[in-house]
Amino acid sequence: MRYKIYRIVSVPVSRHAFLIFSLWCCTAYSAAPAGGFWENDSSSTAYPALTATQISAFMPTTRTTFQFPAPYGTTGARVTLPSDCPNSSNCVNYIGYSYWARMNNSAGSPFMYIMVGLGNSSASGPGATIYKFDKDRDTMTKVGPLFAAGSANAGLSGELMYFSYGHPDGLYFNEGDTSLKRINILTKAVTTIFNVGSYASGDHIFACSSSADDKTHACILEDASYNAIGCLVYHSDTGTFQDFPNSVLGSSDTVHQCHIGADGKFVILMGSNSPEVTAVGNLSTGATTVISNSNGGGGHSDTGFGYYLQNSNTYPGYGATLLWNVSDLAAGGKPVFAEPYSTQCTGSTCYGAPGHPS
């Protein structure tokens, strides 16, 4: 069987416009792979960025597929066109961190939906916009803006929005910094997950995430002045909140990120102080375990089912990516360092280390 892996990249082709591509390569297959190659994570081989001239040579002017040049040989599909932005300006917002899904869970469906934020600090745009990719025919179409022009959320840039795993047509977004909501991208029906006012009047939420079953959600909790004061977890099946305050990270530290486990059993908090620390919260007991920077704490991370993956700048070496096992948290255990997922780098190769694992 042949599988496709999809990712989104944005490439500047001129000072006026950005293009976004969805590209894939084959990882397991019975037929010949369509380009791509494996490379050891300790390799020091560098590949220069494509120039605007090189991109123009293979880039189609319509939403069609194309081939990336050697040494890649992979197939890409053009998503955005200059006409998607007012006056063909550069309004494509950056894609954002890798763990906020901008492509939906399209398993079992011939269609994959992509959300692109049109509107940035340089140019205005229609906001969060939906595109549809036909996986059987390899065709891309523009569905249109997610929110109607003139509505309260029409100006949302798409930043911090993410697709639901359990509801493939659902996209989470914050409304007014106080409510986490999910909109059906096809019917436009909106479901309110929770309003922080029912927990603490005057507070705000920021940078949310949701478990794979859509029952547990985590957001940075901010006070009325938008200062981070902790991590707020909401359990939609029971309608209850859990609060992990800044103090779980240590004295005078503040939450920089909090991310829910895909299984809804734990939450990862990362501190703002330097050196950074990580706190793992057990959602069954409310207990937390702190991992210091020298032991691998700190750095961007993403969560799975009983595991989380995290960048480290100290242990076992700068640029290492660590895999932590937290599957025993429900039983009152502590996270166990499983293994370095990637070989740590040294010297100049560190600058190429992955920054946002997912």
Image (spheres, grey):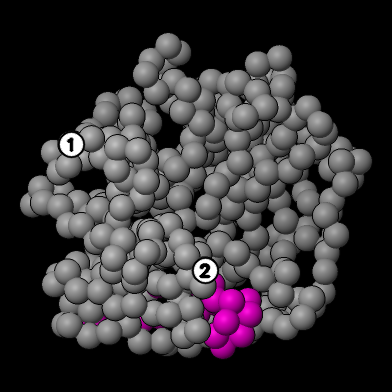
Q: Which numbered marker is on residue 140?
A: none
**Residue 89 pos. (x, y %):** 72, 22
Amino acid of disc 2: Ser
Q: Which residue is mark 2?
A: 274
Q: What is the span of residues highlighted in magenta in the rendered image? A: 308-328
93 magenta-colored: no
**In the current view of this chain or complex, which residue is farthest to the left?**
238
Image position, residue 158 (x, y; %) = 49, 35
Q: Position of residue 345 (x, y in %)?
A: 69, 81
Q: What residue is drawn where x is 73% and y is 43%? A: 11
Find the residue positioned furthest to the front.
252
Helix, strand or loop at mark 2: loop
The residue carrying mark 1 is 201
The structure residue drawn at horizontal position 83% and vertical position 55%, both measured from the top left corner, is 49
Q: Is residue 48 left or right of residue 113?
A: right
Q: Compared to 107, does 79 lie above or below?
A: above
The amino acid pointed to by label 1 is Ser
At which x and y percent is residue 162? 41, 44
Using the image as rendered, state which of residue 326 and residue 221 is in the foreground. Answer: 221
| Separation of residues labelled 1 and 2 (CA atoms) | 31 Å
Of 187 and 217, which appears nearest the observer?
217
Q: Nearer the viewer, residue 11 or 231?
A: 231
1 or 2: tag closer to the N-terminus: 1
Q: Is residue 99 in sight in this rendering?
A: yes
Residue 84 sits above or below residue 222 on the image: above
Q: Is the C-beta separation of discs 1 and 2 under 8 Å?
A: no
